[in-house]
Image: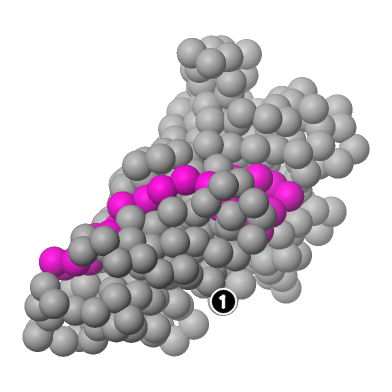
Amino acid sequence: MKNNILKFGLIAFCSVVLVGCNSEELTDQVSIDDIDSEEAVLTAKIDDGSEVLSDLTLQGFEDEEGLAKVGNNRFLPDCATVTIELTNTSKNVTIDFGTEGCEIRSGHIVKGKILMSYELNVEAMSLVINYSLEDFFIDDLQFAGSRTITRLKANDNGNPQYSMNLDFMVTFADGTQASRTGSKTREWIEGAFNGNWGDNVFLITGSWETNFANGTMHSTTITTPLRREASCRFLVSGVVELVRTSFSGALDYGDESCDNKAVFTNTEGEEREIFL
């Protein structure tokens, strides 16, 4: 069923269990039909943007260094310019999407730069990729901060794997800000290094917190790995546990069908089908 990473995981949760994000009168008796759409939309945009950023960084690296480089169907669009700077021990890669807006494969409009740096030994079993963002926007959402990605050439399953720390600030068009911290891991289970971005499939695990300027905190833990397919805009399977203040529940993305549906179950066992 659906969409990475959790792109839209929290929107469903927030849409069904949040009431009055600025209210101090929350109780354990809130109905599953209570809605706080405004903050749900903000959280969903962060989820979506975070996954797009992961796509761009990881596939940008593989376009440059992996066997995927030999393919004609690269992930990065032609409007993105890649600049290389070599030192004696490291390689610096700048992916520049320009200032006017560059449309990527998923239809998002990206502006600004991703600056990556890593050791020259890309054949090493484990490689640390450091990157930062410069005037970087996904649609009308600005991301600021830096990350470290540990790329494992082959995990115990023989698949490429990427462990990412999350630590960034997001600014919305109206000036609203939120921060996200945590970690996630992506295992590349299908389509690795064949030069065709469209058949890439990842399994995602991890947990993180999103803190809004008004003091509201949302936490997310993936309990069943999320499946992200490059050919689908939505997560297609997996389960996440979602918590806001004193409320919690589970969001199930289904049976690997590519659709915009998920099922939310609260702690009372009430279920509701969600349209993402």
**Residue 194 visible in the displayed image:** yes
The image quadrant of residue 175 is: bottom left
Q: Position of residue 276 (x, y in %)?
A: 53, 69
Q: Residue at x 66, y 55 (%)?
A: 258
**Vertical placement of residue 14 versus 2, above or below:** below
Disc 1 designates what residue? 140
Q: Quadrant of the N terminus?
A: bottom right
Region rendered in magenta? 228-249
Q: Position of residue 190 (x, y in %)?
A: 68, 30
Q: What type is the residue that disc 1 sits on?
A: Asp
Q: Residue at x 73, y 31 (%)?
A: 191
Q: Which residue reaches farthest right?
A: 72
* Element assignment for label 1: loop
Residue 87 shown in magenta:
no
Left or right of residue 105: residue 260? left
Colour mapping used in the image: one colour
Q: Position of residue 133 (x, y in %)?
A: 51, 54
Left or right of residue 108: residue 13? left
Q: Residue at x 39, y 84 (%)?
A: 38
Q: Residue at x 61, y 28 (%)?
A: 189
Q: Nearer the viewer, residue 16 or 210?
A: 16
Q: Position of residue 235 (x, y in %)?
A: 56, 53
Residue 235 shown in magenta:
yes
**Vertical placement of residue 200 versus 210, above or below:** above
**Residue 145 visible in the displayed image:** no
**Vertical placement of residue 143 versus 76, above or below:** below
Left or right of residue 82: residue 19? left
